[in-house]
Amino acid sequence: MEPSSAGGPVRLFAVGLPTILERLTLLERATSSVVYNLNSQSVFDPQRRERKPNQHTRERGLNGHLITGPSQHLSLVAAAHPDTWVAPKVQMTGIVIDERVGLFAGPPTPDGRPTAWLCRDPDLITGFCQLWWETQQQAVPIHEFPGVLPLAERQLAVAALLSRGTKDATIARRLGVSPRTVTSDVGRLLDAFGVATRWEGGIVLGRACPPALTD
């Protein structure tokens, strides 16, 4: 069933970041032509649950792309979402598909989990699309943004394991590489984050990978 086909103009889509990311597949399948996506600060999901719908979107040649704001972990975002653009300031987080249905953040649950809500209000959707176009005028492709470094797929895997507190030796065993390779990859990640120490890198990863995403 299409995500917007039941209920009134606003209805609950998902609760909790992992579930929201997993259910994005439903929204992607319902998209036929264009996606307007704004995120004030993108996260990096260690389990890459959003990867399949994003790849499918690119393969289908849909118009539009994610626009996000600056952060220290943009190199992770660039490697995971190469079609992202970066603007100096993104004022709202949400997704609108085909200029007809939107997905927006709602109030958190009593235990602090985020919620996402589907909306078909035409005024809100029109306003969001206009905001996307205005933001895009100030944005640049993420690989052109200062300080963004290319990261290999293995380095994303290293970042994901580091976000869970995994030690270098364990990372090496899991990925089937040498400890020296892991050390080199960690150094590359620190360069990408613009920091000098692993402690600082851990802070950046903590911001990039909220605790709810590392479970």
Image: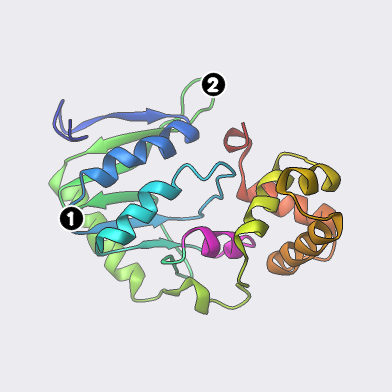
Mark 2, secondary structure of its residue: loop
Q: Is residue 139 above or below residue 69?
A: below
Residue at the image point whose x is 60% and y is 72% from the top:
148
Camera-nearest residue between 134 and 204: 204
Q: Position of residue 74 (x, y in %)?
A: 58, 63
Q: Position of residue 113 (x, y in %)?
A: 50, 28
Residue at the image point whose x is 62% and y is 64% from the top:
152
Q: Position of residue 211 (x, y in %)?
A: 63, 36
Q: Position of residue 156 (x, y in %)?
A: 63, 55
Q: What residue span does the magenta drawing correspond to?
A: 70-81
Tell me the colour scheme of the image. Answer: rainbow
Residue at the image point whose x is 62% and y is 60% from the top:
73
Give the quarter of the image for residue 213: top right
Quickly name the residue at label 2. Answer: 111
Q: Is residue 39 left or right of residue 37?
A: right
Which numbered circle lies on residue 78? none
Which of the two labelled residues, at mark 1 and mark 2, occupies the earlier sequence position? 2
